[in-house]
Image (tube, grey):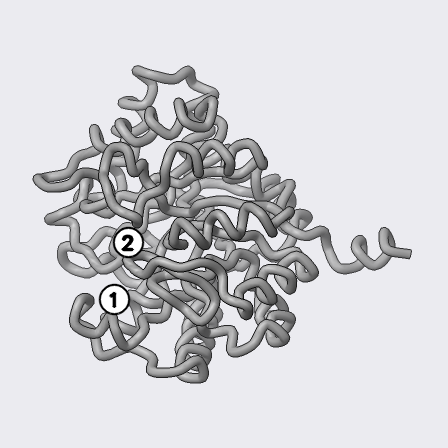
Amino acid sequence: MIVDAHLDIGWNALADGRGFLGPPAPRYVISRSALVGAGVGLVFATLYTAPALARRAMRTRYVYENAHEAHLMARSQVSYYQACGLLMIRDSRELERYLRGWKRGQLAAVMLMEGADPIENPSQLGAWTDLGLRIIGPAWSRTRYSGGTRAPGGLTKLGVQLLKAMRRKHVILDLSHMADQAVADAFELWRGPIMASHSNARELVSGDRQITSATAAEIARRGGIVGISFYPSHLRPKGKTSLKDVVRHALHHARATGGPEHVGLGTDLDGGIDSRYGPISDLKELKELRGMLRKHFNVAQVDGIMGENWIEFLLRSLPEPKASRRASSR
């Protein structure tokens, strides 16, 4: 089973009209049929909302001016996933059950919020976890919770409250897009499961959107996974990208984290880019990636990067079923 830890499925449909249930839109690669045809069995489906400052850069009118608008936009994406019939994995037992019965052609998702502004107040987090939210990345650019990409700064007071609420609700922390100071603050405060869903190596591509080897190593020390983004500007500073660039970042992350057991995929495919600029033009090319990785890693390690590493992480990081948690707390 291939696992992709970052796909903006709801955003693509509602902001740009690229529906999930039909074939991929022209020059794009993601749809349900394309994913299952390539052997993808599990994705992290995002709730991404664009702040007003993104209007020009992303050439979109689907932006929020305040937290309540962000909340409504994210809720509409939850509704879209429900309307698509996308199975949402909520706890470790559901994941175990899905894995036991999985066969090619089936697809499930774990819900990930990219940029936490839709959570109007940390006290609302329980309502979001009831909807199935299991992973939160506090930042995209700057949010009310955290400094982010091209927006330096640490966790805000509200951000500290959010992380405390996330621990109580057994939510996973995603460091992707968090500014360096916010990452440092999180390392000091956070004691729960941690990951970077789609973050490449800063030593290969400069800029605060990528993570340093030190950050990757600390994620690994805490048992987390770093996902490789296929976004062109994350793979190389300029020029045409290819799967060779993906392998280059996989090798770098594997060295930084102490082994490929802490590396996975978080492609961000179709996340605002079309296939003319990305490393693949069809998801079936993921089969070629497996062969290219095999030149550097053994079979089990390649299986890990393609999906098993994320599965093992989720099995130990997702909450237990509510009934089990109530029993263990007595």
Q: Is residue 58 left or right of residue 189?
A: left
Residue at 13% of width from left, 47% of height from top? 277
Give the CA distance from mark 2 to mark 1: 9 Å
Residue at 28% of width from left, 54% of height from top? 30
Q: Amino acid at mark 2?
A: Ile
Q: For mark 1, give the secondary structure.
A: loop
Q: Position of residue 211 (x, y in %)?
A: 36, 41
Q: Where residue 18 is drawn, which disc sits there?
A: 1
Residue at 19% of width from left, 40% of height from top? 279
> Is any part of residue 275 visible from this angle?
yes
Above or below for 210 versus 177: above
Q: Amino acid at mark 1?
A: Arg
Kindly indicate the quadrant of the structure image that contains residue 128.
bottom right
Q: Which residue is identified by label 2?
A: 30
- Find out whether the residues at labels 2 and 1 contact each other: C-beta distance under 8 Å: yes
Q: Is residue 187 left or right of residue 28?
A: right
Q: For mark 2, give the secondary structure.
A: loop
Q: Residues within 10 Å of mark 2 (few under 14, many from 20)?
A: many
Q: Where residue 298 is drawn, which disc sits there?
A: none
Q: Position of residue 33 (x, y in %)?
A: 33, 52
Q: Mark 2 or mark 1, which has the lower sequence index?
A: 1
Q: Position of residue 139 (x, y in %)?
A: 41, 61
Residue at 33% of width from left, 82% of height from top? 65
